[in-house]
Image (cartoon, rainbow, N blue to C red):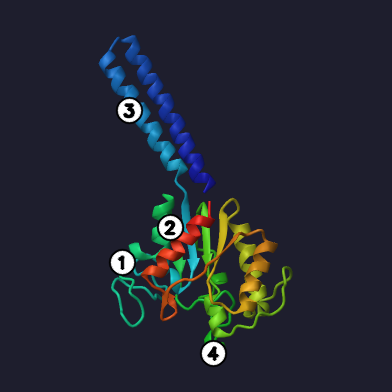
Amino acid sequence: MFFRRFVVTIFSFLLVVSCFFLTFADVITNNQSEMKKTIALLALLISCSCAIAQKKSVSILGDSYSTYEGYMTPSTNELWYYGKATPQTTDVSNVRQTWWYQLIKQKNWRLCVNNSYSGATISYTGYAGNDYSARSFNTRADNLGSPDVILIFGATNDSWAGTPVGDYKYENITYGDLYTFRPAMARLLDYVTTRYVGSEVYFLINDGLRPDITESIKTVCRHYDVPFVELHDIHKISGHPSVQGMTQIAQQVAAAVK
């Protein structure tokens, strides 16, 4: 993120210097027509470079709620939302209807990476007690690119799968600890806030989660000074956001993040 901004700044500076000398040369040769063209080009280049520097990039670390066919990194991640509606499970049929696409458009951001995986848990414990470490948020947190903003939207599957919450633990977290929710949540935020230093990190809390999961998220977020957005009254089909629900999420997140 910082390297990109540094390169843009240097590029802008070089453009200004180059155009200055071109303009100076035109003045010397009294070529007023060419001088005007050069000044206009200078203004355009500065405007474009500033726009690039100011546009924030966002990465998403999520579960099925944030998936969409053709937009995942890596592309092998399991999906819930595809390029067509399936009435039994969703009425979402276009990527433009997803919460994150709407949010990016509202905020004039650009997508860096969407690493979302259907069925993913923050802990290593999945449905029926199966090992979900391969798809865990903790496992995938290293693959988010270099964003200005990171939105973490998870814990729904931990809640639905009956994952044990465990104890609050912020140091000396072992591999075995990651099979319970609180240590896994702590490890995730510790890693993300350290690995992506300088990035703005937000955690989105789904509505309808188990009370102990919701409270655990808030407690761990406060420990790491990570702002959280507690969603409410989201319309769903088969437990997943509908077109209406996607818009509700986008609006609630847009109102909460910078």
**Which of label 2 and label 3 is nearer to you?**
2
Task: Determine the image quadrant of residue 243.
Answer: bottom left
Residue 83 left/right relative to 237: left
- x and y percentages locating residue 164 in the rendered image: 64, 83
- x and y percentages locating residue 124 in the rendered image: 58, 79
User: Is mark 2 in CB contact (under 8 Å) with mark 1?
Assistant: no
- What residue is rendered at 41% in x and 67% in y? 246
Residue 13 left/right relative to 225: left
Q: Disc 1 residue type?
A: Asn
Q: Disc 3 residue type?
A: Leu
- x and y percentages locating residue 53 in the rendered image: 46, 41
User: Is mark 3 in CB contact (under 8 Å) with mark 4?
Assistant: no
Task: Report helix, strand or loop for mark 3.
Answer: helix
Task: Report helix, strand or loop for mark 4.
Answer: helix
Disc ID at residue 94: 1
Q: Disc 4 residue type?
A: Ala
Task: Determine the image quadrant of residue 123.
Answer: bottom right
Q: CA distance from mark 4 to mark 2?
A: 34 Å
- Frontmost residue, 96 versus 235: 235
- x and y percentages locating residue 150 in the rendered image: 52, 58
- What residue is rendered at 53% in x and 55% in y? 257
Task: Report helix, strand or loop for mark 2.
Answer: helix
- What residue is rendered at 44% in x and 56% in y? 112
Mark 4 or 1 closer to N-term? 1
Query: Relative to 79, does residue 71 appear above or below in the rendering?
Result: above
Circle 1: is it few (<14), some (14-19), or many (20+) Cα within 10 Å? some
Which residue is identified by label 3? 41
- What residue is rendered at 55% in x and 84% in y? 161
Circle 2: is it few (<14), some (14-19), or many (20+) Cα within 10 Å? many
- Frontmost residue, 210 versus 162: 210
- In this figure, what is the number of numbered marks? 4
Which residue is identified by label 4? 128
